[in-house]
Amino acid sequence: MVTNDVSFVEIETLRSREFLPAAKEALGSMIKEQGESKLIRPVFNWAGRNSLFPLHWGLACCAIEFAAAFGARWDAERFGVVPRSSPRQCDLLIVNGTVTWKVAHKLIALYEQMPEPKWVIAMGNCATGGGPFRTAYSVVPGVDKLVPVDVYIAGCPPRPEALLDGILRLEALIRERGA
Amino acid sequence: MEWNAEGVRAQLAAAGAPGILSVDPFDGAAARVRFSPESASALFPVLRDALGFTHLSTVGGIDWVERYEVFYLLWSDAAKRYLLLSADLDAKTPHIETASTVWPSANWHEREAWELVGIGFDHHPDLRHLLMPDGYSFHPLQRSFKLHEPEDLEVKVRHV
């Protein structure tokens, strides 16, 4: 559906610096004609849930499984999941390890630096409920005391398959609930 | 000089080390010396300069309920010997003069001992929390510390 002055053929010939203004104009006219909720929301939901960018942040041994999930064998990138190094570029926080009170406010700062819409996966028993360190003096008993959690993954540590399953469940959740 | 309790005692006396209470018999590894905490600031420079214990390996504390104990593990590069210093502190307000003016490596060790066991180090240049967040209000390695229910801990530490 091309409803504006820029045709698809023209888009292919645009220089990169001309692309953003043209895309903005095209989106603006689409919103004007179709209404925001009817057209744009589903498109953004589809694009967002299929390109979840988790923060590249490792806390404990779960981070090893997290790393393995992005390696050649499990290859989470086939689901559009690419870890990014800056919270500004992320919409998914995977808390993969034991959260101590010392690091708690840094976790909250990272979460708040991420742009909306954003989601949190608690990976492993420590992030879910403190794990074997639940009563220890230095450990947060579950990361949901600090940030809202969407998906919990059990295991100590969970295998990469479990992490991929959690990500796919989060995608289903986003499809159901909307971004 | 023989490296046994008698020899260490004689060496300490010859150097004029103040405040030595006793030298316990030891099996050849580390000499174990007890001293009174009031004389700490006078004793530490003597041990470093006159006896050659130039390196402080660790500082730690123990809560023995009726008293606190603070210990220092010293190493002499020249003699290749360890010396374990220890002092008993008052159970109500345990405190001792800092060793960080004599051995700079004591700085972080004393911060840890203060944070976990609650021993105060007078004139310490930077007695802040090391392993726990700022504002953490208890000393978890004291015997009186109970493993709190997580919810209790959350309420106490949440707004740090």
Image (cartoon, rainbow, N blue to C red):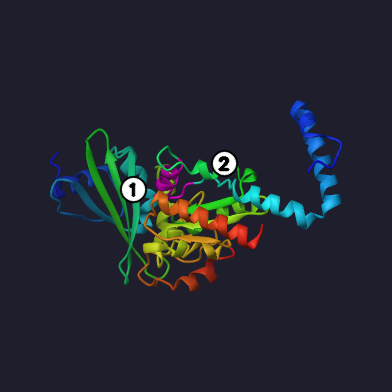
Q: Residue at x 79, y 54 (%)?
A: A36
Amino acid identity at mark 1: Thr
Q: Position of residue A149 (x, y in %)?
A: 55, 62
Compared across the picture, whether A142 is left or right of B65 comes to right
* Residue A47 visible to the viewer: yes
Q: Position of residue A124 (x, y in %)?
A: 42, 57
Chain letter for mark 2, please.
Answer: A
Is residue B93 within the magenta segment? no
Residue at mark 2: A84
Same chain for the residues under marks 2 and 1 in the image = no
User: Which label sits on residue A160?
Assistant: none
Q: Residue at x 78, y 43 (%)?
A: A1
In the picture as drawn, the residue positioned furthest to the front comes out as: A1
Residue at mark 1: B58
Q: Please give the range of residues in magenta.
A: A58-70
Chain letter for mark 1, please.
Answer: B
* Residue A114 visible to the viewer: no
Q: Are marks 2 and 1 in contact (CB under 8 Å)?
A: no
User: For residue B48, what is the image quadrant?
Assistant: top left
